[in-house]
Amino acid sequence: MKTMMEKIKIDKRQATPIQIQISQSIKHLLIDQQIKYLQKMPSIDQLAEGLDVDRLDVKQAYQRLLIENLLHTEQGEYFANYVSFSSDYYLKVSRLYDIIKNLGLTPSIKTLKKKITSLPLHLVVDPSIDKDETYILLKRIYYGNDIPLAVMDIYLPQSSYAGIENMNFDEKPLYEAIYFTYGKLLSSGRRLMSVINLSREDAKILNAAVDVASYQVISVSKDQHGKLIDVSRSISTMNQYFEVDFDQKEIELITKNHFFYI
């Protein structure tokens, strides 16, 4: 904590109000990734004492950062929200397990449910999906530093994965297990992102309030032969400020048909 406070710089000789100097200094540290995602910030009293300023200035600075969604608060403590992603996150194949690692967190996985079922019609988002196929549903929760970050419903065509419902995939990235067991390499797919209100079931799993805004991602992934690997729906309530840089060609690609291609 002391190291972070030493990096927050202000100059009392400047005409710029102290609270603005504090918020700008923290913002620069976030953008430079010197403060990592979900890193705990100094308390208002700690930072006020460390900078030798009025605690009201720190409180107002934190409030500005909360409004910009660069910080969020839990039980009176402040945490960093800023996440800087490469455009590769949207344009290339990326695993949720790896995304959590790239946020500087320790990922872990727990499988909550395994059953044979049909694919919900709202997930038939690609012509390659056979809605009449029988699917194996794996419901998994993904943690970062033991904090529940996302829940995912993964539908695997049963004809391609005989016996998978009897296998234990806890603590393993699913596509890695599929590659070593079935020889299917995740090679391409598409991703549709939206914001929805959290359902009662998902809210309970994620320890969140019902109807809170959350990220929904519907993904279709294919193997090296262009065959369907899975259709998945993930829900995340991660508090994040995203910053992603795209060039014009990338924007044209990811907005085609309102789909994000991975």
Image (cartoon, helix red, strand yellow):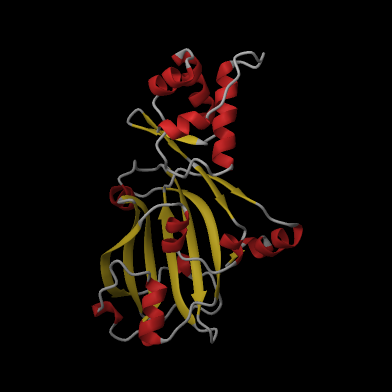
| Nearer the observer, 16 or 229 | 16
| Nearer the observer, 83 or 45 | 45
- The vertical placement of 75 against 142, above or below, is above
The x and y percentages for residue 13 are 64, 13
- The vertical placement of 178 against 140, above or below, is below
Left or right for 147, reference 26: left
Left or right for 204, reference 97: left
Which quarter of the image is occupied by the C terminus? bottom right
| Nearer the observer, 103 or 255 | 103
Residue 121 visible? The answer is yes
- The vertical placement of 157 against 42, above or below, is below
Could you say which quadrant of the image residue 192 lies in? bottom right
The x and y percentages for residue 254 are 65, 62
Q: Residue furthest right?
A: 248
The x and y percentages for residue 211 are 39, 43
| Residue at 33% in and 51% down | 145
| Residue at 45% in and 71% down | 231
The x and y percentages for residue 83 are 52, 47
How many marks do you count on the picture?
0
Residue 130 visible? The answer is no
Which quarter of the image is occupied by the N terminus? top left
Left or right for 148, reference 184: left
Could you say which quadrant of the image residue 21 lies in? top right
